[in-house]
Amino acid sequence: MASLKLIGVLVGIVTDSVTTVMASLKLIGVIVGIVIDSVTTVMASLKLIGVLVCTVIVSVTTVMASLKLIGVLVGIVIDSVTTVMASLKLIGVLVGIVIDSVTTVMASLKLIGVLVGIVIDSVTTVMASLKLIGVLVGIVIDSVTTVMASLKLISVFWGSFVLVTSLLTVGQPGIIFPTQRQAPLNPLLEPDCAFSVRSSKIGPNAAGNEGLQYIANFVPNLKSVPQRITGQICITFDDINNAVQEARRLVGKFIPQEIHELSSDLPEPKHIAAAALIIEEATRILAQRYKLNYDAIVNGLPRIDTSKTAVKQVCPTLLKPVKCELSRYRTLTGMCNNLENPSWGSARSAMLRYLPPAYGDGISVPRRAVDGSELPTARAISFIMHHDVSQHDQQLCNILVAWGQMIDHDLTLASPTLDERRMDIECCKYPPQQRHPNCMPIAIPHDDPFYKFFNKKCMDFARTLPGMRPGCTLGPRFQTNQISAFIDGNFIYGSQQKDAHRLRQFRGGFLKTAPLYRELGLKDLLPMKTVDPDVGCIARPRNAYCFDAGDERVNEQLVLTVMHTIWMREHNRVAEALGQINPHWDDETLYQETRHIVVAELQHITFNEFLPTILGVETIRKYGLQLLSHGYYDGYNPQVNSGIRSAFQTSAFRFGHSLLPDATDRYNKFHEKIEAIRLSMQLRRPYDLYKPGIIDSFLMGLVNQESNRMDPEVTTEVTNHLFEKPGERFGMDLAALNIQRSREHGNPGYNYYREYCGLPKARDFYDLAGIMPNTTIQRYAQLYKHVDDIDLWSAGISEYHLPNAVVGPTFACLIADQFSNIRRGDRFWYENSGWPSSFRPEQLQELRKVQLCRVLCDNADEMDTIQLEVLKTADPQRNPRVNCRGNNINHLDLSKWADVNHFSRK
Ligand code: HEM
């Protein structure tokens, strides 16, 4: 048993061992399996890599084949180029031979030139000798003349003298051209001295004006000459004649015969400009020849009596004494308004000045900085000082802006330089040396925030035509006002006979109209502009026209055209009523009497509603601009020249450019807004007005829409898009035009006008604190070198406004001063008495009732309600809306114009 047990144990051990061996063998089998699997996987991978390598090799082979093909083609091209280069080289050699031949010919010509030069030199020497002989003969003749003149002088009777003072400023006595003047007569001067500058400092150190005296020969009562005279310049009448002749040669212009005409149509401003240019050049010649300083040019030369010199031949007849007749009605040009000085305030007379001009050269070159350097470009001032973030003025309606522009077009129109098609001349498209002499384009900086996107470097700008100085005197350049300075409705009636005729129906005193929608019960539109149809218009559709009126700018912006339409309708409304009251009146009487009334309405509304709103009651009082409520005005003064002042025209009255809105709103008759149209899209494009009834919606917009606030900001609609042409995304810049215009008219900077207005002159930029915003002052300090350099328009619109006024103190002063002259110097002013034009007292009382809201109610197609003070926004308490119909608003009772003489005879 034990053995069996042992055997059993052994068998067990053997079995275990065998089992273990079998297990080990199984394990080995598994491992061998795994190895075989791995090897199989590796082999498969290797096979795949092999396939990929094969593919790559095939691709590379293909690429190499292509490259080889390209190489072959490049080789062919290089071969061709080499052939061409060889041909060019051959041509070069031939050209070289030709150039050598030309050079040889040129050298021969040069030699001939030198020989000709020698001949010319010899001739010049002979001529110079002859000239010398001429001079000597001249001296002999002069001596004889002097002796003769002295003899004549002794025999001259000390006659009456005419006192002539500088016509630079307001209300000074004007030049009278007596038929017989005994000149030269000034006992302080040698007889042939037309003008003498005397100084204790003449010579190289005579920069200052201290001690300078100007003595004109025909002015007897000038201050006595100082005792200590160390220097004297004498300019003789002959010197002046010679300068004028020389100027005529230089300017190369014959004197247009038209300057001797005296009608409303002739001379045109361009004829006057041709003569004025001669005077300007003669002034320059005298200034250079006698080394006159600024003061002598500006204050001295204008005192010379030119009526005895060659200047007389170029002086337009309209500036000489003309015979005037007393008439009940104004002339179209304003000529003969002033009986003593018929041209004062008339169309084509010179714009006057508050201050002497500050031209860069004292004569005509645009103003420079006080240190003599160039001023910053006007465009930079525009985009740095006047970029567009303006807010609304909640008190003012847009019709205030429209009235401002409309009345400006009654007062001023500087004569532009036009081409033969009567279009503004272009400057930028020509290289500088080929430009018109009046070109003065505005440089656009390379980093301009707007124009840089259009790669624009230059903006077109041409100078205003030069105008004849008052009294045809020598001196710095003046400009012409193409229309009369009086409030006389010439924007309705025209300033020339040909325009006035074109606009009249010659029936019932009516103006012409376009009666397009009468069958719809709508009032007439302005007549269409069929003469020069594209002048002043943009993108005129085929078969549509702009509108025609007394002022050529009628289409400048759509709401201005609306205002023109209202006044054409008002004229015809009054004419019709007068025709019913006085059926015996003929067309001419009806036309003139209606014009007489309409002009009075314009004057009354401007002084009663417009000026108090923009100037404030304080300024109105200070400048005596209040209207009377009863009786006649006795302020007419023939010594006052109503002529427009250049600073008013170029700057102060352009305050309205700051008020312009970005868009013009249309409202319905319930005072609800219906549309806003971008301003730039309405400039010179009035075509919308042909839609029946649309005028009313623009009128309602004008009396509801708030204007922009008076501040340094100006809408980009006019600073980047002014008169933008279709398809272009940029236009011109009105702010830059204003600045450039004032500079080219020679107006001094803002600070000088502060002084003129009795305001403290700023000593440095920071003296302006409290007068305008600090940011504005800081920007000025960065832009300009000196506070005196700041441009008038720019600073004028930046001033804080006066209490209850739109403008600040400087513009208030310049505007008030101008309107005071316009009233005091107008013999036909509606409140005047004692003239054939005067209204009867009961008529004057009627005119005093006129309000703009009534004019709008009467001439809109169908207006229900409107606020009484129409220039200001409506407000239930302050400014309530009232019904157009009924008696809430005064009516002008035209029965007071019944012809009493006619009816009493019956
Ligand atoms: C959208 C409206 C207006 C436009 C497009 C416009 C455009 C112009 C342009 C292009 C000029 C000539 C610039 C130059 O070359 O010197 C000018 C001049 C002038 N503007 Fe405006 N203006 C607008 C509104 C006004 C308003 C509201 C006022 C006044 C309240 C005003 C007052 C003046 C004056 C006084 C001149 C000088 C006119 C002359 O004598 O030739 N303008 N304007």
Image (cartoon, helix red, strand yellow):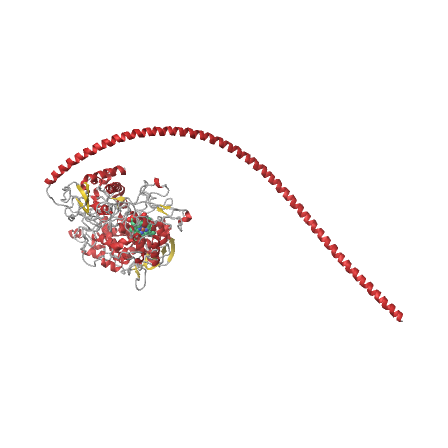
Residue furthest out toward the bottom:
1
Q: Tell me what residue is drawn at x 42 percent, y 29 percent.
A: 100
| Vertical relation: 249 (above or below) 811 | above
Residue at 82 percent across and 65 percent down: it is 16
At 22% from the left and 33% from the top, the residue drawn is: 132
In this view of the protein, which residue sits in the foreground, 336 or 100? 100
- The image quadrant that residue 808 belongs to is bottom left
What is the quadrant of residue 604 in the picture? bottom left
Measured as percent of width and height from the top left, residue 243 is found at: 23, 39
Instruction: Say if residue 332 shows up in the picture.
Output: no
- The quadrant of the rendering that contains the N terminus is bottom right
**In this picture, residue 478 sits left or right of residue 545:** left
- Using the image as rendered, state which of residue 840 and residue 513 is in the foreground: 840
Q: Position of residue 790 (x, y in %)?
A: 31, 53
Q: In the image, residue 658 lies at what x, y percent? A: 33, 54
Quadrant of residue 869 within the rendered picture:
bottom left
Q: Nearer the viewer, residue 692 or 632?
A: 632
Residue 255 placement (x, y as % from top left): 24, 38
